[in-house]
Image (cartoon, helix red, strand yellow):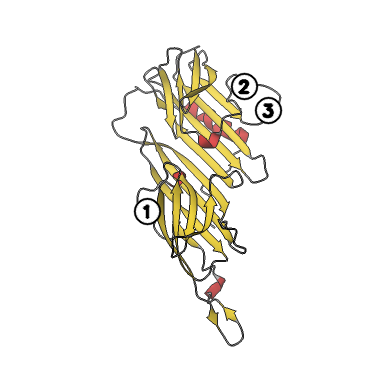
Amino acid sequence: MKTPLLPRFTPRSLSAVAIGSMLCLSAGAWAAPANPRVIGTESVHQEASLTSPTAVAGLGGEVTLVAMDKLYNVPNVITSHGHIEVDPEGLAEGTYTVSASMLSGSNQVLLGTLTIPVPVTSSTSTVVEDPGDVDTSAVEFGGDGTPLPAGIDLLDVGGVLVSDSNNNVVLSADLTSAGISKTFHVESAIVAGPAAPAAKGHLSILSKVRANSKGLNLFALAAKGLPKNITATLAIDGQDVATIQTGRRGAMAILRHVGKAHPKGKRYINELPPTVDLQSIQTISVHDATAAELFHINL
């Protein structure tokens, strides 16, 4: 199994990342970007069980997905890299096709094939030739394995299907299920809007979900170069979710340990509602009382 691409963060270090980025950024003139440029990264590490759709005894396994997308200062521009590892158990010998079901639309993308080797029979036992005791049934797509299909966005993969030679699905994994383990991590600069052309800032999100566990959800957004002493609105995926107050120097910060109270019983001046699902966020924007955009981030 591959080592995750994700560093370890604590509530204190995550907040420090955002505030430090806000304090160290320099102002600049706003203009519509002529060419896409990288402003951050979005990464995911997921583990899900393979199960038999017809509940055949002995069939199972695991799917591991590790992905990182580069975030750009314009929407709909994505570069993705990572890998999907499929490790089935209980399949009969033969060649199977492996496909990914995508979240955006109902289409499936063919990843490639996996082969279960034919057992080698000796005079005393039936064994599988496996020099070095290597698991010959596992297959990797991307990374050091079979190249991924061109243009696939691994963060858009919602499931993995293993089919036999008759196109019957014999194993499947749901990467959207509540029972999976998933770590979601975002580090990105903000993109200034026309109402605050000098805006600079940084977003940090760290969300961990574990089966039978409460998990961890951290959100830190900091910006400066905004209009001073105004009340603005934070919108997520087009819906207003929180009111933000900028300071006398035109700075703001939202530091929220979602799902848990402040360790000292205090409330942040700007806080994110605990009902927000951090792992499903697609867009974040902040606008003033006239609905003019101060800044945004596309995930």
Q: In this view, does 287 lie above or below 206?
A: above
Residue 125 can be seen in this image: yes
Check the image and report above or below for 31 versus 56: above
Indicate the position of residue 208 as horizontal and vertical percent values.
59, 41
Q: Which residue is drawn at 59% across and 47% down?
A: 180
Image location (x, y in percent) of residue 120:
53, 80
What distance separates the C-alpha of mark 2 from that of mark 3? 10 Å
The residue under label 1 is which amino acid type?
A: Pro
Name the mark nearer the viewer: 3 or 1: 1
- Mark sitting on residue 149: 1
Q: Are marks 2 and 1 in contact (CB under 8 Å)?
A: no
* Residue topped by disc 2: 268
Q: Which residue of the protein is positioned furthest toward the left in this rendering?
A: 34
In the picture of the structure, the residue carrying the numbered disc 3 is 261
The percent position of residue 239, horizontal first and vertical second, equals 49, 24
For discs 2 and 3, the disc positioned in front in the rendered view:
3
Q: Residue at x 71, y 24 (%)?
A: 265
The kind of secondary structure element at disc 2 is loop
Residue drawn at 61 percent across, 28 percent down: 274
Mark 1 closeness class: few <14, some 14–19, many ≥20 residues within 10 Å: few
**Depth order, front residue of 89/11:** 89
Question: Is residue 190 something that shows in the picture?
Answer: no
Cα distance in 3D space between marks 3 and 1: 44 Å
